[in-house]
Image: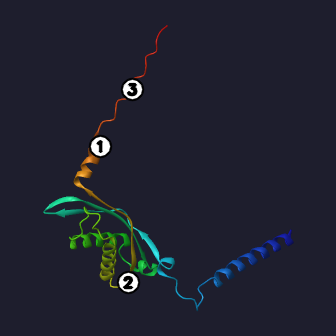
Amino acid sequence: MIKFVVAALWISAATVGAVFYSFQNSGKDDNAAPAPALFGGLDYVKTDIITVPVVRNARVDGYFIARLVFTAEPAKLNKLSVPPSALIADQVYSYLYSNPQFDFSDRAALDLDAFRAGVRDNINARVGDKLVHEVLVEQVDFLTKDDIRDNAKRRRKPATQPAEAPQAGTH
């Protein structure tokens, strides 16, 4: 019985030592070049859906809807006192309201590269450091007020009445 316990302890210690050794030696090679930005070392943070009302001539023309993903260094993200998704949502609002030249109703003229670069640069300028490396667009839509009204009308239509069950005949 004692031999069995000693053998089990020896096997456990050897396994733990092998795992520890492999993790220690699998670290970065000192002579290796740093990995490119989109291949590692950065965290990908997905925002909730951001909805920004588009106001022109003192009335709401529609709503800009976006879901974004941004890349940032984990160490810098941990130093933030504000949640990263709140920071990017605030900067999307600020960027869109300070740049009224973006016309979301004309999808052919919408320059997503300028939008992504502008949001990234505004966040980095606000933080005072290169926090965000890339802003990726997961979803972007523009809904006019008419689109929203049509969707609301479709939802309000009463459900069709179920067909009456046939009456059982008495024979």
Residue labelled with disc 2: 130
Mark 1 vs mark 2, foreground winner is: 1
Count of marks placed on residues: 3
> Which residue corresponds to the image point at 43% horizontal and 16% vertical from the top-left?
167
What is the residue that sits farthest to the top in this orientation?
A: 171
The earlier-in-sequence mark between 1 and 2 is 2
- Helix, strand or loop at label 1? It is helix
Q: Residues within 10 Å of mark 3 (few under 14, many from 20)?
A: few
Q: Compared with residue 171, is residue 25 higher up or lower down, i.e. above or below? A: below
**SS for tag 3?**
loop
- Which of the numbered marks, if any, corresponds to residue 154? 1
* Quadrant of the rendering where the N terminus is positioned: bottom right
Q: CA distance from mark 2 to mark 3?
A: 64 Å
**Residue that carries the numbered disc 3 in the rendered image:** 163
> Which image quadrant is residue 132 in?
bottom left
| Identity, as a three-letter code, of the amino acid under mark 2 | Lys
